[in-house]
Image: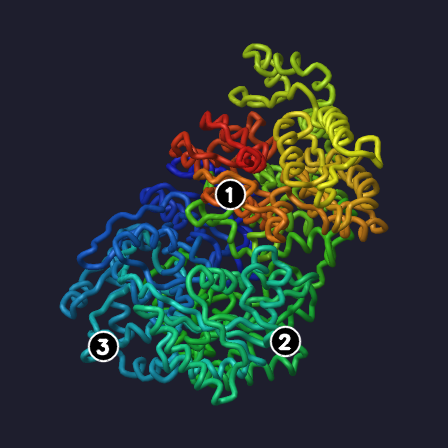
Amino acid sequence: MTEKLKTLARELEGELYDDKRMRILYATDASAYREMPLAVTLPKSVSDLKKLIAFARAEGTSLIPRTAGTSLAGQVVGNGIVVDVSKNFTKILELNTAENWVRVQPGVIRDELNMFLKPHGLFFGPETSTANRAMIGGMVGNNSCGSNSVVYRSTREHTIEIKALLSDGSEAEFKTLSIDDFHAKCEGETLEAGIYKTVRKLLSNYDNQVEIRKEFPKKTVERRNTGYAVDVLLEAAPFTAGGEDFNFCKLIAGSEGTLAFMTEIKLNVVPLPPKEAGLLCVHFNSIDEALRANLIALKYNPSASELIDHYILECTKDNIEQIQNRFFVKGDPGAILVIEYARTNQDEVIEIAKKVEAEMRAEGLGYHFPLLFGNDTKKIWTLRKAGLGLLSNLPGDEKAVPVIEDTAVDVNDLPAYIREFNEILKKHGLHSVHYAHAGSGEIHLRPIINLKTEEGNRLFRVIAEEIASLVKKYDGSLSGEHGDGRLRGEFIEQMVGKKNYQLLKEIKKSWDPQNIFNPNKIVDTPSMNTMLRYTPGQKTPDFKTVFRYQNQDVLQHAEQCNGSGDCRKTELSGGTMCPSFMATRSERDTTRARANILREFLTNSTKLNRFDHEEIKDVMDLCISCKGCKSECPSNVDMAKLKAEFLQHYYDANGVPFRSRLIANFNNSAKLGSIMPGMYNFVMTNKSISKLVKKFSGFAAERSMPTMYKTTLRSWFEKHRKVEGKRHKAESLSAPTPYPLNPKSLKKVYLFCDEFTNYNDTEIGIKAILLLEKLGYEVEIPKHEESGRAWLSKGLLRDAKKIAQKNVALLSPIITGDTPLIGIEPSAILTFRDEYVDLVDDADLEKAQELSSNVYLIDEFLTKEAAKGNIAKEQFTKAEKLIKLHGHCQQKAWSALSASVKMLSIPENYKVETIPSGCCGMAGSFGYEKEHYDISMQIGELVLLPTVRQQPEDVIIAAPGTSCRHQIKDGTGRKALHTVEVLYEALV
């Protein structure tokens, strides 16, 4: 088969991989399943797809269509060829504003489609929680709904036409057909004619009609996704008098790629919703109380009614990004119902909210009723959408597993259903997370189970069986929007009856007689507790790691990634994570891929050193350690930490590369260079000599190299102290110290003299000290080591640990809340908050934690002081300036960018606008390295560099990070200033 795959690869315009690395990356989705595919392909054209179909038919293998890979029921996991259309089938082909439709390829992202539609006053209604990376092909395949389905229903209702390839490679177009057109389609002997004949035969049969209407979920259950949608087709005109015209799109929606391979989709789009939307966030003592109140909320026609339970609210407390979004939470509610009312003006929303509150209070439901508008609503929706990822934050091996998370019942049955559901779990000693679509009768329910144990595997199945029976009791749907896949397919016969299940199998066979399209999903699925990510009873060794992993080990930290794919969002959605994916659009460059590759080898490797695998090194290569995932990944997967840990252990087996050692030793090299800075700068800037140095060191010829300042910051500061000491002595009658303190000082601060500011950006350090002194602060540079950032970035953790130990020992005795440590370079000073507390010995952990709580970026410190009234706008110019601010990645990871905005806004007429950029692309040494230079510039060109080029000369470009300023200079020719420089120049 290997040679046949190689031949196929040569015939395709796109890419095809059959190596172990890529197969591992596509062996999972966002479900509990794992199965190694035969190969992975990224086709470029319909012609490629036809060749793949022909190959599958000839070789007896299968094709598994995939877009973002966020399926929760194992829909895109299988042993055939995974066909990833997310990279190349991404075009919006046509928009008709007169008829309100848009035609797209299956790889178009839902949110980006709506960005395109917004200027036309239109949007595509269904909205999944994964909408910033979910693609239209996947939404059709799963028949996705989302939080607003009480208004916009499911994707099925908005799918007008589909162009697809059938299992024989022929092209077909599915659209609305009159009765005459439907019967005409049944003529002939083609595969397409055969599928029309089959459905006509099956659905014209009276006994089948009776059985379908009897056994399928009742029609008041809006979210019905059990099996193929023959209950919907049955209501069409050929079979039901007065029904709407027949359209096979109704069947394809929710078919999970098992019937045909979609190439184009024509969607209905609708006018933008009312401009004024308010969120009534009602707090309850229990979930039962919230669900009863939900029925009151629905009387007033909300556009959404979403449940958030106490488990998710607890998880937000430990998530850097989401802790800011829980500002509206009062106390520790058992549940919150987020109810959206959208109307033409705010007064209407307020009036409705008052009525809802009054009726709920009259029924004794709810205790806190905040009503929020504007940007606050975005924060709340961000928190709600993060629910799935947040659930992976549970430490250890017990996780909130997707097993019965997609059940839907009539909304009026929901309170009783949930009560019985929880009784079943209680019987087994389990409890569940409850969240999401209360307004549609679908709560995402995830019992907390350890799938690594035999008992956990057994419970996984038992719970599925018992809840399936409960759903059937309420005539509900086992799948509301996440699909059947291989998780629920086994129970479809129980849900729709034996006769109807055979009918579904006939439909599959008529469309796909050779079973090449995504087999073993919906029908003929294997046992639902087989081919899981975790083998029951699996044993993994104790890992001796350098980093500390709180309440878990390194493998468990990697396992926090549940595959939800938040790292697949593009630059258009904003945020930092994941810069390399944003540039390449390749799955192998996602944070998810890196977690998958680590999990695979740390679990299954037979080597003594389980990190010693080239496949891990290859997938980790483009992780630029930006730390974006630390805050933006709802599961809090810190991939920079994992990469550094991996590199240390990989070096243990393979040695440390020369360039890595050279970069890690930056501080020592800079110390030597500072002896003769003129000579050093000549070498680094002379075209010929510099070229040789770069070639020898493995740096990109196109990249400029940093130069030395004429003196170090420490040397300048010693001279400055003497001068200032003499001046203050002359101004005072007596001096208590050889170099007396400024008697007007507000407080003493210690400045961390990081290695980058000390040697390269000395002018910025000087201005920082002068700024602090002019504002009334006494500045001291204490004795300390380098930050260790360069060692950390290259994975030399044991060396970094020694530095951390020394710095904690030197600084913890003097750094307090009254005498804080402040820093200029984000990547250096933030090591105290981030890596140090996970590096130091257990005996020094408390000291490191105490120290970290009194460490600030200078932007944060000055912002806090301004808030206390110690710094006033009158100390600065009244001139008007526009500042475009690019934040450092690690600064963003610690949610510290807002401090820079506030600091730069102290001058009353300074207007600050943040550039909606992620990483600049330089990422420390990454952008210097010859093999990474091109990708570094690609990342910069996504948002940052084009934005800088567009700015007039009088606009100030500000960037706190030394690497960011270097990238801006190399990429645009513009000089970016540190935020401290901007504020210093604004002094009067």
Which is nearer the eye, 702 or 193? 702
Res 211 → quadrant: bottom left
Q: Residues within 10 Å of mark 3 (few under 14, many from 20)?
A: some
Numbered circle sitting on residue 239: 3
Q: Nearer the viewer, mark 3 or mark 1?
A: 1
The residue labelled by disc 2 is 431
**Lower position in the chain sequence, tag 3 or tag 1:** 3
The residue singled out by tag 1 in the image is 907
Do we see residue 594 in this rendering?
Answer: no
Amino acid type, label 3: Phe
Q: Residue furthest top?
A: 688
Looking at the picture, the colour scheme in use is rainbow
The part of the image, by quadrant, that contains residue 964 is top right
x then y, percent, for residue 776: 67, 41
> Which sits earlier in the primary sequence, circle 3 or circle 2?
3
Apparent side of residue 322 relative to residue 472 in the rendered image (left or right): right
Mark 2 element type: loop
Q: Which residue corresponds to the image point at 57% horizontal and 15% vertical from the top-left?
A: 685
Residue 904 to residue 417: above or below: above
On screen, residue 764 above or below 69: above
